[in-house]
């Protein structure tokens, strides 16, 4: 597995890459969740036999932490830097949680360059983060590890200060690639799904090439709740669109 850095207008972005580009299976670009570093995608990078790339957004993992630049457009700039540096073509994106919001922001502009999209448990919206959410995220501990081990305080505060709400629902009908939505269905889970029935219905009615996968033993954290099935379903989607 290769580990290296690329530059996004002075911001150092950490990248993990496994495998090599193939004509048989599209490259998978993993866009991680709000606090997740590139390393959180290692099970996917290790579990697939095809070309897989993940990266840490600004302020996360080993990437650098600018003082400003935490709205949607700056996160899309990080994605662009990775796509351009690796010269990706006809790739598939997997976006998890808030990473799926960034994936939507990218896809509505670049779907003609892509071969597919996997959305993991997130509605088609990039939400603002209010200042009163900062203490929650800064105090969060997941699987025994403080969130601030993965994401810097400056990034949390930057999101609260800069992130604006952007809706993508009206643009779904323009997407001309296969989109598969993974959603958690375990309502008793400690971290419940981010998707309501209405969100899934919206996807189903608006997207031309839509499919869905229910994870009955998962809440929102599908990659951790059902890791083996999660990777298998990613494989199945990549196989279907190759």
Image (cartoon, rainbow, N blue to C red):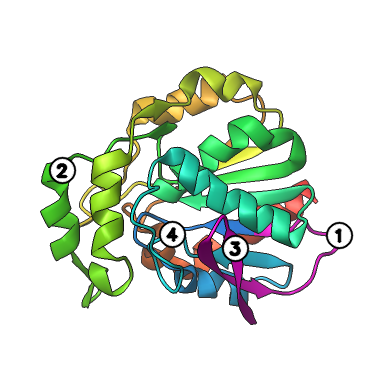
Q: Which residues are magenta?
A: 1-28
Distance from label 3 to label 2 (Cα)?
Answer: 29 Å
Distance from label 3 to label 4 (Cα)?
Answer: 11 Å
Picture coordinates of residue 181, whole percent (x, y) = 52, 42
| Between marks 1 and 4 in the image, the one whose residue lies nearer the viewer | 4
Element class at badge 2: helix
Which sits earlier in the primary sequence, circle 1 or circle 2?
A: 1
Q: Residue 58 — which label?
A: 4
Q: Residue at x 58, y 39 (%)?
A: 106
Residue topped by disc 3? 7
Which sits earlier in the primary sequence, circle 3 or circle 2?
A: 3
Distance from label 2 to label 4 (Cα)?
Answer: 19 Å
Q: Residue 71 — which label?
A: none
Picture coordinates of residue 216, whole percent (x, y) = 38, 52
| Between marks 3 and 2 in the image, the one whose residue lies nearer the viewer | 3
Residue 2 on the magenta segment: yes
User: Up-down: is 73 above or below 229?
Assistant: above
Q: Is residue 218 left or right of residue 58?
A: left
Between 61 and 26, the one nearer to me in the picture: 61
């Amino acid at each position: 597995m290769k580990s290296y850095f690329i530059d996004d207008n002075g911001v150092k972005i950490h990248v993990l890459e496994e495998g090599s580009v193939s004509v048989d299976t599209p490259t998978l670009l993993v866009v991680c969740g709000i606090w997740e570093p590139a390393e959180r995608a290692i099970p996917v990078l290790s579990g697939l036999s095809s070309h897989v790339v993940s990266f840490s957004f600004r302020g996360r993992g080993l990437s650098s932490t600018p003082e400003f630049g935490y709205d949607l457009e700056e996160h899309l700039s990080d994605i662009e830097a990775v796509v351009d540096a690796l010269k990706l073509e006809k790739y598939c994106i997997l976006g998890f949680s808030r990473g799926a919001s960034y994936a939507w922001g990218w896809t509505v502009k670049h779907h003609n360059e892509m071969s597919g999209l996997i959305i993991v448990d997130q509605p088609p919206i990039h939400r603002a983060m209010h200042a009163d959410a900062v203490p929650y995220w800064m105090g969060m501990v997941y699987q025994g590890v403080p969130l601030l081990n993965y994401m810097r305080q400056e990034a949390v505060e930057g999101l609260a200060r800069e992130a604006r709400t952007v809706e993508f629902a009206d643009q779904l009908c323009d997407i001309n690639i296969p989109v598969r939505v993974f959603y958690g269905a375990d309502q008793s889970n400690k971290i419940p799904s981010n998707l309501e029935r209405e969100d899934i219905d919206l996807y189903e009615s608006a997207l031309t090439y839509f499919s869905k996968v229910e994870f009955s033993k998962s809440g929102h954290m599908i990659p951790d709740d059902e890791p083996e099935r999660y990777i298998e379903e990613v494989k199945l989607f990549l196989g279907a669109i190759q």
